[in-house]
Image (cartoon, rainbow, N blue to C red):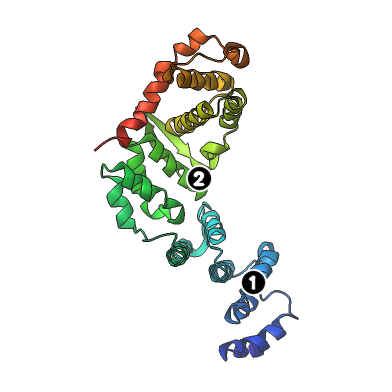
Amino acid sequence: MEEIKKLIVDEKYEDALKKLLVLEGQYLSKIQCLYELKKYNELVIFFEQIVDSIEDDYFEILGYYILSLIEQEEFDKALSILNEELSMPYIQDNYEEVLNNLYDDVVAKKQAYLIESGVYNQTITEEDIVEVLFENNYDEQLSILMKLDDYNVRKIKDDLEKYLLSEKSPVLKTFILEVFIKQQISDVILVNKHGYEYEFMASANQLVFQDINYLKTRNLLEEHLAKFPSYLVMALDILDLFVYIIYPQTIDVDEINSYAALIEYYIFSLNIDELVADFEEFYNVDTSDIINRVDFLIEMLESEEKYVNAL
C-alpha cells in the first residue's frame, strides 16, 4: 500500500487504480482515483455496488459520490441521498456540518445550472426566504415557498415553524409540510390550522396527492362528472384546494362519498343547475345531509381566499 499511496500523492491516479483493482477493500483510495481521473459514471456505479460493504471512511467516500453526481448534473438524486443521511437520528463523528455543506453545494450547482438553462432567473438565500415569510404578500410567499424543494430547510426550520404556528395561509403551510416530508425532517413539528394545533411528523405522513382517500374521492368525481367536463374541472380544482387547506387532516375512508357529493353539489349550486338524476343513488347520500354541510365547505375555501386576496 505504501507504493500505492506514493502514486496517489504523486497524482499518478491511473497507475494507482490499476494496482488497487486487484486488492480487496481499499474503497476510499479507489473512489479517490476514479474521481481524480474524472471517471464519474464509473465511480457512481462502483459506489452503489459497494455501499453496503463500506465499514470505514463512509462519509469521505459518500462525499466523492455526491460530487460525482453533481458533475453528472444528477442534482435531485444527490439531494435525495443527502436528505436521507441528514434524517438519521445520529450522524457519527460530527459529520452533520459536512453533509449540510455538501447539501448547499448541490443546491448552488443546481441553481447555477437552472439559471444557465433559463429555468430560474435568480437564486434565493436564507435571508430572502425569512424576509418574505412574514410579509403579507401572498404571491411572493407562494413563489418563494415553491422553490423550497431545492433549499436545505433544516437551516431555517425554526422560522418555518413560526410560520406554521402563525395566522398564515393554510395552503402555503401545507407546501412547507410537504417539503419537510420530501427532505425527511425527523422532528415533530407543530402546525396551527383553523385554530387547532397539530403535531406533525414527516416520516408518519405522505404527500397530499398520494393519499388513497383523496385519490378515491377524485375517481368518484371523474366517473360521475365525465359527461360534464367543465364541471369536472371545477370540482377537481375545489377538491385539490380543499385537501391542501385541511392537511394534515385528510379525508376519512367513510367520508369519501360524502365529500365527493358535497363538492359536486356545490359546483352545481354555483352554476344554478339541476343535479344529475342519479346523484343520491351514485354517492349513496341524502341530498339534505349534503346541503347541511355546504357552509362548512364554503368556510374552508374562504379560509384560504382571505389570504390570497389580502392587500
Q: Residue at x 64, y 71 (%)?
A: 41
SS at circle 1: helix
- Give the vertical position of 296 relative to 110 (above or below): above
Q: Amino acid at mark 2?
A: Ile
Q: Position of residue 162 (x, y in %)?
A: 32, 42
Q: Quadrant of residue 296?
A: top left
Q: Quadrant of residue 244?
A: top left
Instruction: Answer left or right for 252 relative to 120.
Output: right
Q: Residue at x 37, y 33 (%)?
A: 192
Task: Confirm or deny contact between disc 1 and disc 2 (CB under 8 A).
Answer: no
Q: Residue at x 34, y 31 (%)?
A: 305
Q: Position of residue 135 (x, y in %)?
A: 26, 45
Residue 41 is marked as 1
Crowding at mark 2 (Cα within 10 Å: few <14, some 14-19, many 20+): some
In depth, the one of 144 and 131 nearer the eye is 144
Q: Residue furthest right?
A: 22
* Residue 212 seen: yes
- Give the vertical position of 63 relative to 34 (above or below): above
Q: Position of residue 88 (x, y in %)?
A: 53, 53
Spatial CA distance of label 1 from label 2 is 29 Å
Crowding at mark 1 (Cα within 10 Å: few <14, some 14-19, many 20+): some
Q: Amino acid at mark 1?
A: Asn
> Marks 1 and 2: which is nearer the front?
1
* Residue 249 seen: no
Q: Which residue is mark 2?
A: 181
Q: Position of residue 211 (x, y in %)?
A: 57, 34
Q: Which quarter of the image is occupied by the N terminus?
A: bottom right
Residue 206 is marked as none
- Give the vertical position of 284 relative to 223 (above or below): above
Instruction: Answer left or right for 275 relative to 155.
Output: right
